[in-house]
Amino acid sequence: MIKYNFNEIIALLLSLLILNNLLLIGLNFSDLFLKINLILFFIVLLGFYFFKPFENWYLKIFFILIILISLGTPTYEWDPRSIWLFHAKRIFFDSSIFSVSDNYASFSHNAYPNLVPAFASSLATFVGHWNEIFPKTAFTFMFLPPLIVSYVFFKNVKYLIFISLVLFIIGKYLFTGWADGLVAIYFSLSALLAYLLLINETNSYRNEKILYFIAFTFFTSLTLIKNEGFALLSILFLSILIMTIYKKNFKKNLKKILYLSFAFLPIILWKMFCYYNGIGNDYVNLSFVSNILPRIFDFENYLLISYYLLLNEKFLFSLAFFAVIFWINWNKELFIFVFVNAILYLLVLFLVFLSTPLDFHFQLDSTAARVIKTLSFLLSFFGLYNLNSGKDKIVI
Amino acid sequence: MNNQNSKKLLLFFLIICFLQTVYIFHFRSGFQYEIIKNPFKKNSGVHFALPDPVIEAKNIIKKNKVESFNLSASIKDNKALYQRIIEFNYPIRLKSSSDIFFFLKEEIIPKECKIIDTGEHLFLTKC
């Protein structure tokens, strides 16, 4: 009989219930079903806390503290108010994720995916009214599945180092209503699962079917959190393709890759809906070429982007952490995999900044520190993972 | 690594995590004790998150049972005020066809507009 890991089951259930919430709203199910779904979510959460009360207790305490901070923090920052929680408010009052087809208040970027706002709106449905505080905790609850799954890979001191990295790199993004921290953690976990299940052939995780389901839900969630998620999952699939072809095991993994690629389906359907309703994207549109052409040949622009992206103190720390651990414990396969993902993401970021329809300096100043979090967390996360892996693993 | 060192390291990182949480709570969160006392109350946190004219706009809309509203050019030019009034007042919508206009008190109101209500920061008018 196959024995499944407790943390894997909890993470999978929580992740599925978050996705199911979006599905229920999308299919126009009544509030009763949304409330049942949310009750199930809290039952699973209670199961996590009380079924094995002393397992992973660091996370349990840390998470309660973060939820308490979230419940005492007003939502005053720009994107959480104008985009994420406004989407949630619209879903709550309109009882639909499709009401954005009127493109009302286009400043709120109606084409953005709605997984977290849908969850936030269901919290309001559950309580019975909208307010400025508690729906925001949906962003914090969304962190739980990847934080719980991480316990499968890191134990004891390593798990505390992991939490410390989360606090250092993601920090206030755990509770302020921004989606960038979620993108960072979902991408890193997705990348690790992709590496273990499809690329590395010498680990026991490959035999755990539940991890394929978790990978699928994380991939899907990643694309439905923010537009960057779609770009990141595409990068991840490209790197899987490169690595499996390089290792000559592409054919062997083809079925798994095909199965996991269905994670793109919900976001593709959402983007098709937006396209047919004329809801645009500021960055991917006809003005892309006219925006990028005047900037692409000016070397100064590359220096400026590099300055904002790469001289970020958290990125530099993560790079140093990653470099030192790989220097001590060389793992060529893992290094190439992370390197390919990081370089491809950097390329995408350069393209996005060079083609911004907004003022170049304003765009860099307002977003660079947020989007580089994904890369910073990726490097730190895989640095920490490499403490575990390989024959020369560093014992803590 | 022996058990004793492992325990020391565990304690060390526990303290680090605790200090990081305290730092985020104290310096990065904008935490308010007033809010945590009742985070589920309908208007919880409103005064910490929004400028007074925005809250006033909602009160005026509620008092006068306004179904849709419009904003003066001056408010529309103020990106922060414009976006906050729109998102905070939802599901009451801004409509370009609406003849109910908000003006800032320092603005000159056109002659064809009649003042319906006056707040500390805003005029509600019918134009």
Image (cartoon, grey):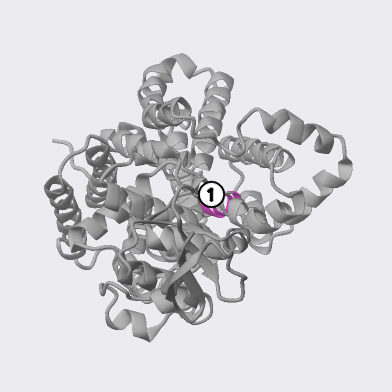
Q: What stretch is highlighted in magenta?
A: A375-381
Chain for mark 1? A
Numbered circles on residues, count: 1
Q: Does the magenta stretch include residue A378?
A: yes
Left or right, B36 with reference to A167: left
Residue hosting label 1:
A107
Q: Please report the residue visible at 38 percent of the width from the left and 36 percent of the height from the top.
A: A220
Return the residue found at the far top.
Answer: A251
**Residue A179 appears in the figure:** yes
Q: Please report the residue visible at 41 percent of the width from the left and 40 percent of the height from the top.
A: A224
**Residue A149 appears in the figure:** no
Q: How crowded is mark 1: few (under 14 residues within 10 Å), some or many (20 or more)?
A: few
Q: Which of B6 and A252 is in front in this view?
A: A252
Q: Is residue A104 above or below residue B3?
A: above
Q: Where's residue A316, x and y in %?
A: 69, 59
Q: Where's residue B4, x and y in %?
A: 41, 76
Q: Where's residue B100, x and y in %?
A: 44, 59
User: Which quarter of the figure is the N terminus of chain A placed in?
Assistant: top left
Q: Where's residue A50, x and y in %?
A: 16, 65
